[in-house]
Image (cartoon, grey):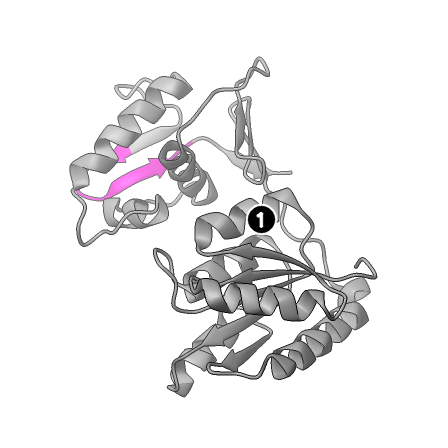
Amino acid sequence: MNSTPHILIVDDDSEIRLLLKDFLQRRGMRVSLAQDGYGLWAALEAADIDLIVLDIMLPGKSGLELCQEIRARLRTPIIMLTAVTDTSDRIVGLEVGADDYVSKPFDPRELLARIRAVLRRQDGRAAALPDPPSGRFHFAGWSMDVDKRRLLDPAGIRVELTRSEFNLLEALVEASGRVLSREQLIEKCGGDASQSFDRSIDILVSRLRRKLDDDPRSPSMIETVRGGGYLFVAEASRG
């Protein structure tokens, strides 16, 4: 970790974001800000973050969902902010990978103390932690870099995918050999399964197949499972 910790504050309340930025910067820390999940991932791609302060109540994906997604890819420490007094939310936060939590309203000095404590613990166990799973996949000659959001065909040429197409392919590849329902795919693509139609995923799969040059009548990658959903049949490997 850099001698000057870089903290990412993720909160949809602009006053809290700016207050914490000013407070932490005056204590010698670098601070980046985000108001939702999109901003969070953009900040993680743009810089090395030493610790994330993540609010539970966010527009779009909740802090708990984002915490789970972060933990699947990164070991960056996370402190949850919650205005909820129900201890079950705190327990869930810790179960999905948060390192600590602070309840709103809070004293910034308490948050600072918890940030410093979590960073000290992280330094102490960093050498013992295994490397996180690789964000790269290989299948049927194709290469997919999840962190860089990049897909290369067997000739090494980049194939442009929309955000939804990339999320769909990522979900299918990660679940290679396992059927995913349309509802599961809608959620993984960033939609609301309760408000989306199955047809939207069918259209998205059709577009993705064309870009992968995968014939739906004789698929070598994405197979339709009648009454079930979709199955990625190509052998996929990490690394």
Q: Is residue 74 left or right of residue 39?
A: right
Residue to which mark 1 is pinned: 43
For this rendering, which residue is in front, 215 or 84? 84
Q: Is residue 10 above or below residue 160?
A: below
Element type at mark 1: helix
Q: Give the quarter of the figure containing the C terminus.
A: top right
Q: Amino acid at mark 1?
A: Ala
Q: Residue 9: x, y in percent?
A: 56, 62
Q: Residue 117: x, y in percent?
A: 72, 79
Q: Residue 95: x, y in percent?
A: 50, 74
Q: Quadrant of residue 226?
A: top left
Task: Count the marks.
Answer: 1
Identify the main secondary structure in magenta: strand
**How many C-alpha atoms fall within 10 Å of the one at disc 1: few (<14), some, or many (≥20)?**
some
Q: Residue at x 73, y 64 (%)?
A: 29
Q: Residue at x 37, y 57 (%)?
A: 61
Q: Residue at x 58, y 35 (%)?
A: 148
The residue segment tinted magenta is 224-233
Q: Residue at x 54, y 29 (%)?
A: 150
